[in-house]
């Protein structure tokens, strides 16, 4: 058994080594590249709701959210709609790569929305253009492509934004998943 005079100095050296190793990784949060990111089911509760929009989670059919806007785009407080946040590992991995953004959605069964828009917002650099999609009563995959810029700053977060009706008529759409995946060369 180790005596205290040996144990504590040895423990301090082990902890110092662990901390030095962690700091030497330079802020890396994961091992390797991320090829795909997805938010679906109950995880859709992680979507952020901006001023002028609203969201309700329903556990039916594996879980989905009902999205709507009650303020017209550009009116009221600044907003990018309802958005999903991709973390630093995804931002680092997707930077400079063409990615495909896929939204699985349909018009709400009650007071259905006809058209929604989506855009990809890196926190630094230019965003994608808003992409416009026409909803139907059936689940559909809506996709668009974008190449997030490579930036010199420390990785932060990218956003996939959804604007459910730019007119703000409080009509609804249902969203089952949001995914971002690298496009194979």
Image (spheres, helix red, strand yellow):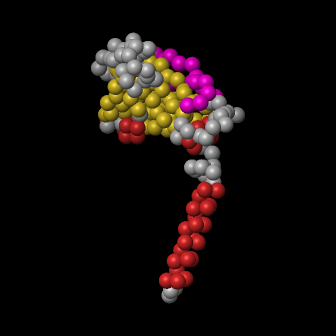
Establish if 15 lies above or below 40: below
Q: Can you say which quadrant of the picture contains the C terminus?
A: top right
**Number of marks:** 0
Q: Is residue 35 left or right of residue 113?
A: right
Residue 172 in percent (x, y) is at 35, 20
Q: Residue at x 46, y 37 (%)?
A: 39
Residue 86 in percent (x, y) is at 52, 37
Q: Residue furthest left?
A: 110
Q: Residue at x 58, y 38 (%)?
A: 91
Residue 177 quadrant: top left
Q: Is residue 28 left or right of residue 134?
A: right
Residue 46 seen in render:
yes
Q: Residue at x 53, y 74 (%)?
A: 11
Residue 13 in percent (x, y) is at 58, 72
Q: Residue at x 49, y 83 (%)?
A: 4
Q: Is residue 71 left or right of residue 134?
A: left
Q: Residue furthest right?
A: 185
Q: Is residue 131 magenta?
A: yes
Residue 90 seen in render:
no
Residue 138 quadrant: top left
Q: Which residues are magenta?
A: 123-147
Residues 113 and 152: in front is: 152
Residue 182 in percent (x, y) is at 62, 35
Q: Is residue 142 magenta?
A: yes
Establish if 111 lies above or below 4: above
């Amino acid at each position: 058994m180790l005596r205290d005079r040996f144990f504590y100095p040895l423990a301090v050296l082990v902890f110092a080594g662990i901390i030095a190793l962690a700091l030497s990784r330079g802020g890396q949060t994961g091992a390797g590249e991320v090829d795909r990111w997805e938010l679906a089911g109950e995880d859709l509760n992680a979507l952020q709701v901006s001023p002028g929009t609203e969201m309700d989670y329903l556990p039916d059919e594996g879980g989905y959210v009902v999205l709507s806007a009650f303020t017209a785009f550009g009116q009221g407080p600044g907003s990018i709609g309802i958005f999903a946040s991709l973390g630093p590992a995804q931002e680092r991995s997707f930077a400079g790569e063409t990615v495909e953004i896929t939204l699985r959605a349909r018009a709400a069964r009650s007071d259905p929305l006809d058209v929604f828009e989506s855009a990809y917002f890196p926190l630094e650099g230019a965003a994608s253009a808003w992409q416009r999609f026409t909803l139907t009563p059936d689940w559909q995959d809506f996709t668009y492509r974008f190449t997030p810029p490579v930036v010199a700053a420390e990785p932060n977060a990218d956003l996939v934004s959804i604007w459910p009706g730019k007119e703000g008529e409080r009509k609804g759409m249902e969203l089952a998943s949001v995914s971002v995946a690298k496009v194979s060369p």
